[in-house]
Image (cartoon, helix red, strand yellow):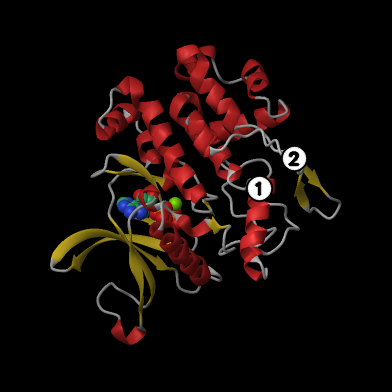
Amino acid sequence: MGQGAYSTVFEGLMDLDGVQERVVLKRVKQGVEGAEEMVEMEALMNINASKGTARGAVAAFLGYCWVEPRDAAGELTPGLWLVWRYEGSNTLASYLNRRDGLDALAADLGVAPSDVIQTATGQILSALAELHAAGLVHRDLKPANIILAEAERRLKLIDLGGCADLRSGTNYVPGECIYDPLYCPPELYVLPTAGPHIAKSLLAQATSSMLWARHKPDRYDCWSAGITLLCLAVPTLRNDAALLRFQQELEAADYELDAWRASSRFVKPTDFAALDADGGAGWELARDLLRPRDIVVAADGAVDFVASSEVRRISAADALK
Ligand code: ADP
Ligand code: MG
């Protein structure tokens, strides 16, 4: 089904208590440095996300297994395999790549075409809010990692390989960033780069609570949700070249979305019709999600967040309201 840097994704059938279930399998690529650790982390993140309240926010994880060389049979080659329920055949990216994509998405979500952007955005924010409430930050939110679960008519998050559990510190190394340059926020990091290593801290829970309260790492994903909202609502922005240009122009406009819109050299006023409807409610939401964070970059490149109780970029839960 797909291929990333560290893994290959397959579709398959699995016998679960006598019932043939359509499943998705991900296998570590052999001979790629760090690949095994990445996929092991992805398994852990799926376990963490599925055991609590974030369960419905992510694709249903069925488990993982090691295939030993001597047990390898047919196409199930040796190595670590992760298995999910097959949720559906479309990601948000595949809808957005089609000319009739929003109509198709509306039909699959069971809503009127005029409601589709609002419904989809609400579902994405609600999945994010659930993930964040569980202490997890996705770090790779984008249309390609949002799948339509056909049976539930709900958008769910997939691809937790870059997800950080900031309660336990699992899959989090200070100063390490895992990002897609088109969707990640300008500050690049979830937390200050010289901050404590939560997993190695003796008081991991207290450290984690302090870091969440002070720096609000969940806001990383909120930026990505803002970009995703723009992709949904502004057809001109629905390709990588346009997103790159948007990013350059936004930076030149000091990250003021209104100033960008007024100065952009490639969008037209009518491109924003969906966001301007209802007194500009969608535009206001995009503006609140796409606010920069105040950071200080030291001479050695360390990135610190300005500790302030006021982080202007809103949380997924507040955006949902
Ligand atoms: P990668 O690391 O290669 O980006 P992903 O986890 O994003 O891996 O999965 C790659 C592709 O496989 C997705 O874009 C999607 O099309 C498909 N896919 C992944 N998980 C599921 C699932 N649970 N149900 C259906 N399709 C899935
Ligand atoms: Mg992916």
Helix, strand or loop under label 1:
helix
Q: Residue at x 49, y 53 (%)?
A: 134
Q: Mark 2 = which residue?
A: 308
Q: Which mark is residue 1?
A: none
Q: Amino acid at mark 2?
A: Ser
Residue 99 visible in rendering: no
The residue under label 1 is 213
Residue at left 36%, top 83%?
68
Residue at left offset 63%, top offset 50%? 212
Picture quarter with the N terminus: bottom left
SS for callout 2: loop
Against 270, residue 40 (above or below) is below
Nearer-the-camera pick, 265 or 141: 141
Find out if the beta carbon at label 2 lies less than 8 Å from the nearest ligand 2 atom.
no
Circle 2 Cα neighbour tier, 10 Å, few/some/many (<14 / 14–19 / ≥20): few
- Please tell me whether residue 56 is drawn above or below residue 108 in the rendered image: below
Q: Is ligand 2 within 8 Å of the beta carbon of the residue shown at mark 1?
A: no
Q: Which kind of residue does numbered mark 1 sit on?
A: Ala
Of all residues, the one furthest to the bottom in this rendering is 70
